[in-house]
Image (cartoon, rainbow, N blue to C red):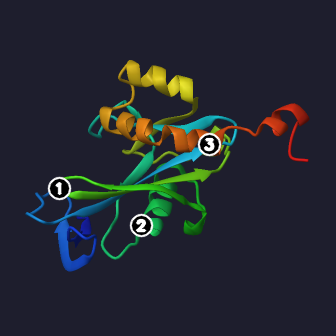
Amino acid sequence: MEEWNDIYNENREKTGALHLRGTPWGPGEYGLVVCVWVYDGKGKLLLTRRAREKSFAGTWENSGGAVRAGEDSRTAIARELREETGIDVPKESFELLDSQRDKNTFYDFYCLKHPVPLSQIVLQPGETDDCMWASFGKIHWMIRRKKICRIIARQFYRQEKMLRLRNMPKIKDVFLGGNR
């Protein structure tokens, strides 16, 4: 199935032209990719494992993907998360952490507090084949052992401080057993 993406200029403005996924980008053409770190509020992040059919097969990652033609960033991240995990939340639920640009891609990085049991995750055949809640320490261990690909590892290191601030239980919650 062909997938088309909007082409943006260097100022992140849509040009009105479309790009066929998997073909080279022209000079001055940019696509848009979205990623999300789902966290549980207790110090863990949701990771999915890439299926055998994918590039970087068997490595762990956060959910995300390319924004399709006609979509905005938040619509795309809600769709990608739903497709890859079955988690279905309104697009307004996602918090934008950061935006970046490289040679031919703009990236929007989101986070979402959603402590869902693993038994409720619905993996997408051909995309994901396993999932886990991982602590920050476990993610560091996985990166050292190359169980998380370099691209996702760099993203994690850039966003780790922001994720820790959102994802660690508040001191009073730890000592008092909840919000009071």
Counting from the top left corner in percent of width and height, residue 170 is at 76, 40
Label 3 secondary element = helix
Quarter of the image holding residue 13? bottom left
Image height check: is 114 above or below 70?
above
Q: Which mark is residue 22?
A: 1
Q: Which mark is residue 165?
A: 3
Label 1 secondary element = loop
Of tags 1 and 3, the one toward the viewer is: 3
Residue type pointed to by label 2: Ser
Residue type pointed to by label 1: Gly
Q: Is residue 1 visible?
A: no
Mark 2 or mark 1: whose residue is earlier in sequence: 1
Q: Is residue 13 left or right of residue 140?
A: left
Q: Is residue 87 left or right of residue 145?
A: right
Q: Which residue position holds label 2?
A: 73
As measured in the structure, the alpha-carbon distance from the residue carrying label 1 to the one carrying label 3 is: 37 Å
Counting from the top left corner in percent of width and height, residue 136 is at 55, 29
How many neighbours does mark 2 have within 10 angstroms: few (below 14), some (14-19), or many (20 or more)? many
Image height check: is 144 above or below 67?
above
Q: Is residue 97 visible?
A: yes
Residue type pointed to by label 3: Leu
Of tags 2 and 3, the one toward the viewer is: 3
